[in-house]
């Protein structure tokens, strides 16, 4: 009679990594292809070539040819901790769609919880200061050479 306890499997994962890798790749890419065929993917102007079915097929086939490397980590202290660990990743989103109030060419407006703390923390910051405070991105540092005196000259738009 099973005692319903989780047992340690030893040094090997219960599914060989190669099998899991190939299964995940197949399911993921089949789902992505289904979204494409259903017209549910949006492409920016930099990915305009993917809007064409030949461009998409080449991109998809290239993804199938790549070797994927899944990261499999041994669970720690049982099933409950594994679920809690996974939950942090599967339910982590920046802004849910229900919080987006409006979008136009210049701004996105969204609702937040703890609005007073949020407002006090980010009110009166320039865009550069906001990016640094929220995401630790310094737009004055060149991503190529590390030079620290880049200056904002305005917004540019790519061809659409």
Image (cartoon, rainbow, N blue to C red):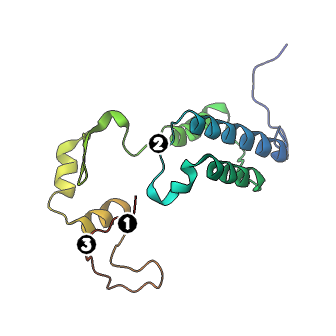
Residue at coordinates 81% horizontally, 42% vertically from top-left? Answer: 13
Distance, label 3 to label 1, CA atoms, is: 21 Å
x and y percentages locating residue 91 in the rendered image: 49, 37
Q: Is mark 3 on a helix, strand or loop?
A: loop
Q: Nearest the camera: 71 or 10?
A: 71
Separation (CA) of disc 2 from disc 3? 32 Å
Q: Quadrant of the C terminus?
A: bottom left
- The residue beneath circle 3 is 154
Secondary structure beneath disc 2? Answer: loop
Q: Nearer the viewer, residue 56 or 79?
A: 56
Q: Nearer the viewer, residue 47 or 25?
A: 47
Distance (Cα) linking label 2 and label 1: 19 Å
Could you say which disc has been placed on residue 92 in the image?
Answer: 2
Element at label 1: loop
- Residue 141 spot, x, y in % from top left: 38, 79
In the image, residue 160 above or below residue 16: below
The N terminus, quarter of image:
top right
Asked whether disc 2 touches disc 3, contact meaning CB atoms under 8 Å apart, the reply is no
State the residue position of label 1.
136
């Amino acid at each position: 009679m099973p005692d319903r306890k989780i047992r340690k499997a030893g040094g090997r994962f219960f599914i060989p990594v190669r099998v899991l890798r190939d299964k995940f790749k197949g399911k993921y890419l089949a789902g992505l292809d289904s979204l494409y065929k259903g017209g549910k993917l949006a492409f920016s102007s930099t990915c305009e070539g993917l809007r064409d079915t030949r461009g998409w097929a080449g991109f998809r086939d290239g993804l199938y040819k790549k070797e994927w490397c899944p990261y499999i980590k041994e669970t720690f202290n049982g099933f409950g901790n594994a679920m809690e660990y996974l939950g942090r990743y599967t339910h982590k989103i920046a802004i849910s769609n229900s919080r987006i109030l409006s979008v136009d060419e210049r701004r996105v407006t969204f609702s937040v919880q703890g609005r007073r703390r949020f407002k006090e923390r980010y009110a009166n910051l320039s865009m550069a200061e906001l990016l640094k405070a929220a995401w630790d991105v310094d737009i004055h540092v060149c991503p190529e050479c590390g030079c620290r005196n880049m200056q904002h000259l305005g917004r540019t738009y790519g061809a659409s």
